[in-house]
């Protein structure tokens, strides 16, 4: 009788462990299937690659306002929420030529990333200037080239990597686009928020 009871306990324990593993696996699969490029509310579900035609079409819809020359693929709050330990996080953005002409050279439009000066609350103040700049794959305060040209639009990714032990902080990032021939410029911004890594 006691032997049968022990066997029953072992079988139930194994069944419980297998059920938990199946649930964890299911959550991971669903999470990967529906993972958006950014994690904030009301943000579109762009895959990371701005070179995808589908993604470019989605970004182009942001140019409905004729006064906008730079569009970034984030939600209405312009926030990129990135978990600690994220190796590469991509933010798709685009700019269009100021004169409406077809872009034939990557030398015509360039973009710069600029960081809001240090405060007590932002990453520049908490992590320091060098560590904050090192989070970005692109050069800060220097001209960068766009990845792709298509008619009067230029497209690129802003890529960020967050080491797992990075302190939590927020940093405003200015994206400035310049026409190197006419010196016309336009820009936008987003807030990079480093958030705590969850269980998954």
Image (cartoon, grey):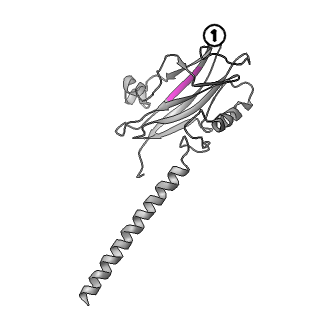
For residue 199, above or below residue 183:
below
Q: Where residue 10 sits: x, y (%)?
A: 30, 76
Asked if residue 119 is among those painted magenta in the image, a careful observer would answer no
Using residue 133 as the reference point, say whether residue 51 is left or right of it.
right
- SS majority, magenta: strand
Q: Is disc 1 placed on a helix, strand or loop?
A: loop
- Residue 196 appears in which quarter of the rendering? top left
Q: Residue at x 63, y 16 (%)?
A: 105
Tally of numbered tags: 1
- Taking the view exactly as shown, the residue that stands out farthest to the left is 2
Position of residue 19 relative to residue 169, above or below, is below
In the image, residue 15 sits, relative to residue 35, either above or below, namely below
Q: What span is in magenta? A: 172-176
- Residue 139 at x, y percent in the picture: 46, 21
**Residue count near mark 1 (Cα–Cα under 10 Å), binned few <14, some 14–19, many ≥20:** few
**Rendered residue at 41%/46% (across/down):** 197
Residue with the mark numbered 1: 183
Classify residue 36 as left or right of residue 120: right
Q: Residue at x 56, y 44 (%)?
A: 36
Q: Quadrant of the N terminus?
A: bottom left
Residue nearest the viewer, comparing 165 with 52: 52
Side of 90 relative to 134 (left or right): right
> Furthest-bottom residue in view?
1
């Amino acid at each position: 009788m006691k032997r049968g009871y022990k066997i029953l306990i072992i079988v139930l324990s194994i069944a419980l462990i297998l059920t938990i593993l199946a649930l964890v696996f299911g959550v991971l699969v669903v999470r990967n299937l529906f993972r958006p490029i950014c994690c904030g509310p009301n943000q579109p579900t762009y895959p990371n690659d701005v070179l995808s035609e589908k993604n470019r079409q989605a970004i182009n819809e942001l140019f409905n306002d004729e006064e906008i020359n730079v569009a970034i693929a984030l939600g209405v709050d312009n926030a990129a929420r990135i978990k600690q330990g994220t190796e590469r996080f991509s933010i798709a953005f685009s700019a269009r030529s100021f004169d409406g002409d077809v872009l034939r050279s990557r030398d015509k439009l360039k973009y710069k990333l600029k960081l809001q000066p240090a405060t007590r609350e932002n990453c520049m103040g908490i992590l320091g200037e060098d560590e904050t700049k090192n989070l970005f794959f692109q050069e800060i305060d220097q001209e960068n080239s766009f990845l792709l040209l298509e008619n009067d639009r230029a497209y690129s990714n802003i890529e960020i990597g967050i080491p797992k032990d990075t302190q939590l902080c927020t940093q405003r990032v200015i994206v400035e686009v310049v026409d190197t021939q006419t010196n016309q410029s336009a820009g936008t911004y987003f807030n990079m928020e480093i958030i705590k890594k969850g269980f998954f």
